[in-house]
Image (spheres, rainbow, N blue to C red):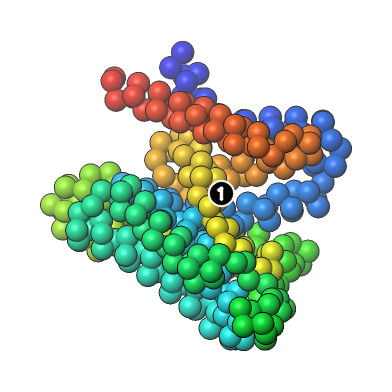
Amino acid sequence: MDKALQFIFKYGSLIVIGFVILFFSLWDEHFFTYANIADILRSISIVTFVAIGVTFSLTVDGFDLSVGSTVSITTVVTAAMMVWYEQPVYLVIIVALLIGAAVGLLNSLLIVKIRIPDLLATLAVMYIVAGIHKTYTKGYSIYNNMPMPDGSTAPGVFSESFLWLGQGKLFGVPVPVILMIVAVAAVHLFFKYTKWGRQMHTVGGNEEAARLSGIRVRRIRTAAYIASGVFAAIGGILFAARVGTGQIDAGAPMMMEAVAAVFVGYSVFGAGKPNVIGTFFGAILIGVLLNGMTMMKVQYYANDIIKGTVLVLALAVTFVHLSRRRNR
């Protein structure tokens, strides 16, 4: 019995992904094609970047609820800088990343310095950032040559080089997919082989023990929240580049998908903790489910039921196994 549970805990998520792919492939012959698989990977690339940010915060035993609002504000700011102010692409990207870092820094100030609990602090920041971006845009989405309040037309358009980041291909592979794979590999190597990455895991495992061993806990937690904000900002940049507009509240649905991907990832290879490889597979599972249900013409409002069910099952397997291991 124990061996069976350990096997399910270690490989259950991968088996489910394989089963879901097989099911949809048998249901629709167009599912398991290069074009559709590439579309699935492209669709999860943005959520994966946001989920990597959440992974950083969870690694230090925190939680970042503001990632969705960070996606939204960076999406509209990148659009505004190009459409309203005709700024070059490099400056647009730099400003967006700085905004993400600033949101992360604000989170860390509230959590690390003022000692507000993570959930409450990042919830407050989520509302603040959402209010700022809606006030900034006056509630309107930003698009090429849009009408302005004074009756004129916005002078700029989305740069083709910027849109290439979200819509282009390199050697036949969508650019966002390449960026996602590079990011997942880089973050995995960061956590596994760098001093800062290992210290983040140590802080998340036992903050007091980490402090007694000489680790600068406050600095590590601050860095984790800044990283969370930066990765959410990258998600916002890619979203704007993919759709070619600055949509308000673009990141609202991504926050829950990102959180689901991270927690599903707990059970990948029996990790039992935040890990970027598990997060990636969690995002794949959610992406495959949403794509397959779309092909089956399932009503869109049923998607949340499926995502919630998957999350509950993944958490149940994870925490049942962890509790049994602690009770031995």
In this view, the residue farthest toward the right is 29
The reply to whether residue 274 is in sight is yes
Whether residue 48 is visible = no
- Is residue 213 positioned above or below 243 on the image? above
Give the residue type that dot 1 points to. Pro
- Residue visible at 68% across and 77% down in the picture: 147
In this image, 85 relative to 231: left or right?
A: right
Query: Label 1 belongs to which residue?
Result: 253
Dot 1 alpha-carbon crowd within 10 angstroms: few under 14, some 14 to 19, many 20 or more: few
SS for dot 1: helix
Q: x and y percent of residue 101 in the render?
A: 40, 69
Residue 152 position (above or below residue 262): below
> Observer-nearest residue: 157 or 42?
157
Q: Nearer the viewer, residue 19 or 239?
A: 239
Check the image and report above or below for 63 versus 232: above
x and y percentages locating residue 129 in the rendered image: 42, 63
Judged left or right of residue 297, residue 201 is left
Q: Residue at x 59, y 31 (%)?
A: 305
Q: Quadrant of the C terminus?
A: top left
Residue found farthest to the front: 150
Residue 117 % position (x, y):
26, 48
